[in-house]
Structure formats: structure tokens, C-alpha cells
Amino acid sequence: MPARYCAKSHKGGRGASNQSSIKPAGYASIRQRGRVGLATPVPPAAAGDSQVFANAGPIGDIEMTNNRPAHAGMPVAEVDTPALALDMPAFTRNLEKMQAELAGSGVALRAHGKAHKCPDIAKRQIALGAVGVCCQKVSEAEVFVDAGIGSVLVTNEIVAAAKLARLAALARRADVMVLCDDASVVPLLGESARAAGTGLKVLVEVEVGGKRCGIAPGEEAARLAGLIERESGLSFAGLQAYCGSAQHKPDYAERRDMTARVVEAVKTTLSALGEAGFARAFVTGGGTGSYPFERDSGVFTEVQAGSYAFLDTDYARILGEDGKPVRTFEQSLFLLSTVISRATKNRAVLDAGHKAHSMDSGLAGIAAPPGGRVTGQSDEHMVVALEAGTPPGFAIGDQVRLVPGHVDPTFNLHDWIVCMRGDAVEDVWPIAARGPGL
């Protein structure tokens, strides 16, 4: 008996969704930064493969779909799910609140674009006062520069030759900065800048407690800065000092103390740089969970907050000095889902699973309706335990509004963000920089 074909496991090929359309034979399709195009012609199958593929039929170009879940003017209740949705009034208030939080401090906001990967969002952050964006991947930087963002910091170490060439080329069109924490990478950065005929601004990333990337603070960092400054095509621009683990510590004192150690590492490094003749005032880092400490440190010139614009269940656990949840910002990002099963009276199943929601920081919360609690998640499904009495709003076909567990990777699972104002869809924006991040 022949095996039963399962299209969900590979998302393409013969037998895949009828939403795909077949193009002329001999080509394979690619998806790059939200666009579909034709790739290199596919060579004929090897002779030994002929029997294996005898019944497979012709190989054609399969055009990937990018269906929008909504359109402007439609009711939110009719949005096709699962879909990411942004409450526009709350989103705007969050942007305004962050600028108010930093006003008069001398510390700027460099909004972290890796959180949303959406040029439309980045432009609104800059319009309200952000000095630019940061991101983690060259592919993300390309999308932001293509969209007209003038200042982009890639908060990561880039070492592959192909990526370095693309990064250096971006410097022709925007103010581009990148990180370095190893002397062996300096010549690679310099070579790429010279080949492109551009100059790259390079920040030394200092290890400040995250135990990830970063050179030791102090003299080692100063020596690396000297190598960068002396390399043709490069300029040493300052320091990256980001402690990701401090962002999500619920306890206020723990976040404060971790950030105090970051500040001491920065001060040690600034002193060493001054003694070596490479004094720079530019220091960037921090995030949504720790920005008040960096803002008030006297050494940071930028903070790299990103999640502040949206929030998630993880940031909802952050406590203030009074031991109560911090409510500086409000939840603006939601995952819309639909009830697709009510097999038992105390359980509802939604159409949003791993492919729509990242649970690396925990399960999603439920914003509306009340009376349910998410208890599990699998590839295509989310399970909700219902309170006794079958609460309204969980009948088959009802829309459930979820709070993501972690903003950044959940954005990366979606092609579009639905902009809501009240009960109506205002716009639909492409999440153009999503993907694996080449």
C-alpha cells in the first residue's frame, strides 16, 4: 500500500497546497525578503534518480503565496487567522512614552528593529524621535536601508565574506555600523570596506555579563579599538555594551545590580580607551527591561529598546522598585486566533500553534475573552482550558485575542502585521525583514 503523502511536512512540491501556482518547467522559486523570484534553473535529475521520480510528474516553479490576512476597512472580527495585530492607539502611546522617558537625559533611542522587522514601524519610531534603528542581521539591515532608514547599527558580529560584502555596500547609502569582538575579524572588515569603496564604522562589543559575544572590558577592548582605528577602511566608533539577560529579570534589584556591573565595565573600558588615545563618547546598549538604569548611568549615549512598543507576557512579569508590575508601557501587540474545536466542554482548541507563536519564553496569554487559559501548544494548535460554565466567546468560529510570549521570534513567523483601530482594520504592513536572516 503506498505511503500517504503529507504536504505539511515540506510545504512545497507536487501535492502541496492548491494556493500555489505552477510556473514554466525547469525553474525553482525563491523567497527573499518577502519577494518571490526565479532562481537558477534546476538541472535534470541524475540517471540513478529516474526510477525514484518516475511518478513525480514535471518539476515546475512553485510560486509561494503571501496572502494578506486582512485589508483596510474590514472589521477586525473578520481578519483571517492566525494573524499578528497591532493596536494602533496603544502602539503610538508607547512610542510617545519612550521618548518622554528619555527627554532631557541626553540619551537617545536607537529602536531595535529586530523586534518587529517592519520598515513601517521603524519609520514611525524615527518620526517620533528615534535616531535610527539597530538589527541583528545583514538581511534586516538591507530591508531597512532599502526603505530609507538612514542610520542602521547591526548589533552582531559579521564574519562571512558574502555578508561582509553586502554590509559594506550598504554604507554607500546609509550610516552603517557593525560590531567586532575579535582581532582576527578586523582585516576582514577592512577588506570588505576597501573592496566596496566605502568606510565602515565599527563598535567594540564588550562582555558585560551576558556571556555571549563581547571582548573583556578594559585593556583588551582598548587594544582591539586600536586595531580597528588603524585598519584602512574602518573607523572605531565607540562601544556596544548590552546585557540581554538583565532585560527579563522580574526583580527590580536584580536588574539594577546587573546593570550597575555593566556600567562599571563600560567605565573601565572608557578609561582604558582614553589612556590608549582612542577616547570615544559613544556607548550604546540596554533595552526595554533596563533602560532607566542606562539612561541615568552617565555613560550611555543610546539605548536599544525594542519590545517597549509592543510588550509580551515575559515583559508583563517585570516588577518595579515597589514590587508591583511595571506599567510604563501597555500591551499593543496581539495574536488573533480562531476557535476550531470544542470536543469537550472544558477545552477549546485554537488555530495558532508553533508556526504562528513562539513559546521560547512561555505560553501565550489570553487578552480576550475572559474565562480561558492556554495550557499547551503544538505545530498547528493551541489548547485552552475553560473555566466551569463554558464562558462566552469560545464557541467554534469565535475569535480569541492572544498576548504573545515573546515579541521578536513571533514577529518572525508572520508576513504581515494587521493595524487595528477600534474594531476596524486601518492598514496592513509587511514584515519585510523576517526570515532566517542571511
Image (cartoon, helix red, strand yellow):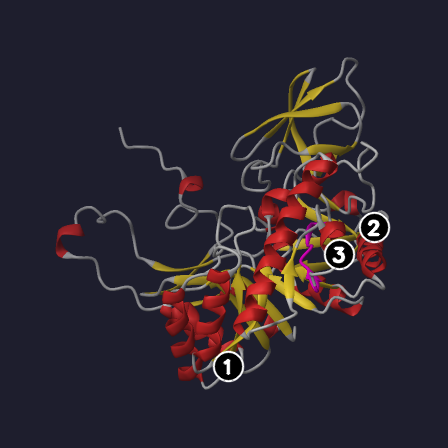
Query: Percent position (x, y) of residue 374?
Result: 66, 27
The residue lying toward the viewer, choosing from 254 and 226, is 226
For residue 352, the mark is none
Name the residue: 73% across, 24% down.
372
Q: Which part of the image, by quadrant, shows the C terminus?
A: bottom left
Judge whether 39 appears above or below 379 on screen.
below
Disc 3 designates what residue? 295
Q: How far apart are the alpha carbons under marks 3 and 1?
A: 30 Å
Query: Which residue in the structure is indicated by mark 1?
Result: 199
In this picture, which residue range is highlighted in magenta? 301-307
- Judged left or right of residue 376, residue 109 is right
Q: Amino acid at mark 1?
A: Gly
Query: Given the current orientation, which residue lies at the most extreme bottom position?
Result: 197
Q: Gap between marks 2 and 3, in whole Å?
A: 23 Å
> Mark 3 is on which residue type?
Arg
Is label 1 in contact with label 2 (beta carbons under 8 Å)?
Answer: no
Name the residue: 80% across, 66% down: 128
- Taking depth in this image into account, of 28 and 2 the one nearest to the observer is 28
As drawn, which residue projects farthest toward the left?
48
On residue 90, which mark appears?
A: 2
Q: Residue 76 in the image: state x and y as whole percent.
A: 78, 46
Residue at disc 2, secondary structure? helix
Q: Dot 3: what SS?
A: helix
Q: Residue at point 81% right, 24% down?
A: 392
Tag 1 or tag 3, which sits nearer the N-term? 1
Image side of residue 270 versus residue 387, left or right: left
In three-dimensional space, the C-alpha distance between marks 1 and 2, rounded to whole angstroms, equals: 40 Å
Mark positioned earlier in the residue sequence (2 or 3): 2
